[in-house]
Amino acid sequence: MGICKEEAFVGTRYHAGIGATNVGRISLGDMTVDRLGFGAMHLCGSHAWGKRWNRGIARKVLHRVLDLGINLIDTADSYGPGTNEIQIAESLYPYPAGLVVATKGGLLRPDRYSWVPNGRPEHLRRAIEGSLGRLKIERIDLYQLHAPDPEVPIAESIGALADSQQAGKIRHIGISNVSVAELDEARRVAPIVSVQNEYNLRKRTSEDVLAKCESLSICFMPYFPLGGGGSLPALRVRRVADRHGIGVAQVALAWLLSRSPVVLPIPGTHSIEHMEENVRARKIRLTKEDLDELE
């Protein structure tokens, strides 16, 4: 039975966007979301670290997200840490009907530059309670294991999430930063509706994970969808952008949307202007020539 289904999508993998707009909605478990989400981590500042800053800008950005029809917001307890979830609640609570707030747990932040896995069940149970409190909700729509802990079998970590799901604290379970083998192991413990790995024009090491997600109809949510920005103005990307009279970031997002019907990018920014540019990528048609050049 398929878990993630893209609605009104035309085409097949890799050249799926040819001749059709990339506008669409996608099923995420029993939820339906726009095929472009919003990653909120940049609202915390550099390296997703620090106290809540510029509360007014965060509020304006998040409200503009909703105005543009985006109804999936991705965050994590490690962004801030903790403060990104508070920003979302302060800006949007009570949440409008249909808004999906996805969060993650399993990474500790001892300092600005460190991300330390902690997949112990007791930690994850505390993390879930913390996220519920900061987001002011009784059930998390999508809770994702942020990364496997090499010291803890992934089955134990997912087992803790499954227990919380049975208790009504989690609606759906996702995983992040995983291999195909880890995805398979997680699926043996609980239904998995999403995978969130780094994937973009520059970094395609999760190609096998994407293929696995497509075969299982699991949503694949690429983070750093713009490749960190630094490599985007490369010659091939610039040529495609110039042909269409658009920006290189829009090319990167349009490429992801055409890559597979299960891809659900979650670009993030603290600029309303940049966010509006990102959203326009939903309507960009990339030709076969464009896609071949970007290979």
Image (tube, grey):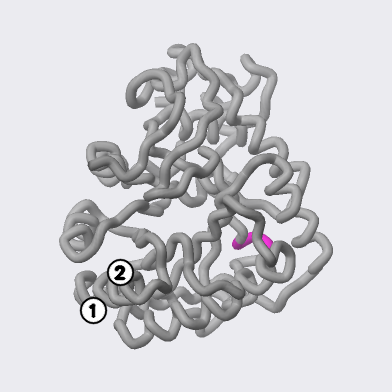
Question: Is 110 drawn above or below residue 171 in the view shown?
Answer: below
The residue closer to the viewer here, 253 or 122, is 122
The residue wearing badge 2 is 148
**Image location of residue 197, percent across then percent down:** 39, 53
Residue 231: x and y in percent read 55, 41
Residue at (61, 36) in percent of width and height:
249
Q: Please identify the quarter of the rendering in which residue 183 is found.
A: bottom left
Taking 63 as reference, is 145 above or below it?
below
In the rendered image, residue 17, in percent from the top left (x then y), is placed at 46, 21
90 and 54: which is toward the camera: 90
Q: Nearer the viewer, residue 14 or 75?
A: 75
Foreground pick, 9 / 18: 9
Specify the label residue 152 is tagged with.
1
Check disc 1 and give the amino acid type.
Val
Please, what secondary structure does the residue beneath circle 1 have?
Answer: loop
Q: Quadrant of the N terminus?
A: top left
Q: Are marks 2 and 1 in contact (CB under 8 Å)?
A: yes
Secondary structure mostly taken by the magenta-highlighted segment of the chain: helix
Residue 45, visible in the rendered structure: no
Magenta stretch contains residue 128:
no
**Quarter in which the C terminus is drawn:** top left
Per the rendering, the mark at residue 66 is none
> Label 2 vs label 1: CA separation?
8 Å
Residue 287 vertical placement versus 158 (above, below): above
**Residues rendered magenta in the picture:** 41-45
Q: Taking the image as drawn, is residue 172 in sight? A: yes
